Each structure stands twice: as structure tokens, then as C-alpha cells.
Image (tube, rainbow, N blue to C red):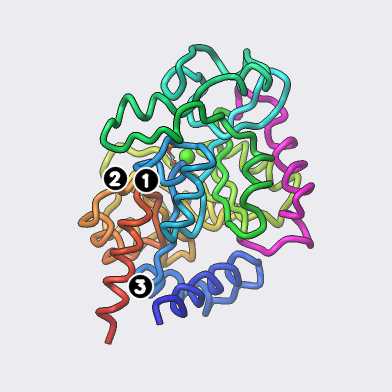
Amino acid sequence: MVRYIRWMAITSLVIYLSGASSDFAIAKISSDYGQIKAINISHRGASGHAPEHTLQAYELGNVMNGDYIEVDLQMTKDGELIALHDETIDRTTEKKGLVKNLTLKEIKKIDAGSWFNEAFPKKMSTEYSGLQIPTLREVLDRFSPDSKFFIETKSPEVYPGMEEKLISILNEYNLTGAHHTFGNVVVQSFSVESLKKVHQLDESIPLVQLLSYYAPAVITDTEVSKIKEYAVGVGLHYTAVSPGYIKKVTDSGLMVFPYTVNEKEDMDMLLDWGATGMFTNYPDRLDEVIQSRTSKEP
Ligand code: G3P
Ligand code: CA
């Protein structure tokens, strides 16, 4: 039953994202989707359990029933897109430096897993030592077409040509235009310009506008209308969210994806408030919350 509901939920999202959406589909997502059919996004993979943005973390996200793998993008000196959150390699490797100053060959020599074992000894695994930073192509080689992706253009102002490269790679993997299953790739960014550029290159890709707020978040009708011109949803820090904010945004037909929600109590509360889904470092916890809510359904 849970599987069926999950399947129905994803199908509804795909229909909605396909552009073949109707008021019915939008209403379904905005009203009852958040109650029992939340979208589970593995934030940087299951990054509470394994080193973020490694193939192991992504794999674990899938094993833990994440619906989407979240991939942050940076671009190397020689123009390759890699999965990494920071503009530097300092925090998540044993080396230091800006990604934009390093070639892919240099990036590939770096250990992106040992830091996790040192930072989280209780979760350490010998398998994590020596893990590489994956390229976007490597991620897609491993997980497409079976997985779905929330891809973020990070610091697009630092990386001219990032959007063109992204669309070109998505094209290679038949993840754009008429070829792909709509909703399998969502592009997200804090940059309005970057999202609009993605749509100039390929209008078929659903976009999520990430927003920065000092809590509590407030959004005007004009802002909602402007975002609706190009995006299907918004993402914002979960501590800034209020029930009124979610209601206003979802009533407009936009989806709401709070980040990064790691405690079950918060997950449950956000679903009560009508969040469409959320980013979490613990997709296993969110899955348990979703399943528990589903089992309580009459
Ligand atoms: O993409 C949603 C969320 O990941 C944004 O924050 O800093 O973790 O990329 P950050
Ligand atoms: Ca992100």
C-alpha cells in the first residue's frame, strides 16, 4: 500500500512537472501531497551517513528510499562539472584550493572521503577512504535513468558557461527535451539568472527557486507571481518556514521544499504544514516519518 501511494505520488509529480498539469494536479499536490506523499530528497546524498557528494552517499540515499538525489555543481578549470558543495576543496578533502583553479585531473587525485571518517568516527568506514569527487557524468553513468536528480547550479557567477555545459550533458543522457521523462531532473538555484538561462537553453526542465530568508520567511503576491513565471517550486531553510508561508505558496500552485531537515519531529511538523517534500541528510528518517503517517491514514 505504501509503495502504491509512493508510486502514485511520484506519478502525480511527474504529471505536474510535465507541463501537462491541470488545476486538479496542482491542487492535489498543494493540498494533500504534503500530508502523506512527501518527496524525499537525499541532500548531497545520504550525507548524514556517508561522505557528502560521493557515489556511496548517493547510492545510500537510494537504498534509504530517497526519491531524488541532490547534486550541487561546481566547475573545474578545464570546464568539467563536478558534484561538490563548496567553491573550495578545503572542507571535504585533505587538500586546499578553489575548484575553478584546479583541473579535473588534479581533482581526481584528491581523497574526498577520509575527512568524513575523521569528523564522524562512529560512522567511519574503510570504504570511504580515498573516495573521489564524482563528475556529473559519472553520477549519471551510475544512476541514470533509474534515479531522479535535483541539480543545483552553485556560484554560477563564478563559472561562465556552467548552464550550457549542464544542458549539454543532460542532452547526452537523454534527460532533456522530448526524450526524457519529465520530472526526472529538476534544476534548482539561488540565482534567478542561472535558472532563467537554463530555461533559455531548454524550457522543458522544471526549475526550483531557492530563497534565502532571515526567519520568519515572508513572500508577497508579486514575488509569488514572478517565481511562477519560470519555476514550479521554491526551496528555503526549514527554520524560516511557517504554516502561513507554505499555505500561501502552495495555494498559488508552487511546491515548497524546505532544507535541510534532519530531525523527525521537524519533518512531521513540516508535513503537517503542507510541505511538498524536503531535503534531508537522513532519507531513512524521512522515509520512516512518511511511512508512519501513511499507516495512520484511515
Ligand atoms: O539545494 C537546497 C539546499 O541544498 C541549499 O543549501 O547550501 O546545502 O546547497 P545548500
Ligand atoms: Ca544544494
**Within the magenta stretch, is there residue 172?**
yes
Q: Secondary structure at mark 2?
A: helix
Q: CA distance from mark 3 to mark 2?
A: 22 Å
Report how far apart the C-alphas of labels 3 and 1 lie in the structure.
Answer: 20 Å
Q: Earlier in the sequence, mark 3 or mark 2?
A: 3
Q: Which residue is mark 2?
A: 240
Viewer-proximal residue among 259 and 41? 41
Depth check, front residue: 228 or 83: 83
Q: Is residue 73 above or below residue 185?
A: above
For label 1, count other residues whose C-alpha is less than 10 Å away and answer few (under 14), some (14-19) or many (20+).
Answer: many
Pointer 3 with pointer 2, Cβ within 8 A: no
The residue indicated by pointer 3 is 36
Per the image, label 3 sits on a secondary structure element best described as helix
Q: Disc 3 residue type?
A: Ile
Give left or right: position of 198 versus 272. Answer: right
What span is in magenta?
Answer: 156-183
Which quadrant holds residue 75?
top right
Looking at the rendered image, the disc whose residue lies closer to the viewer, 3 or 2, is: 3
The residue pinned by badge 1 equals 281
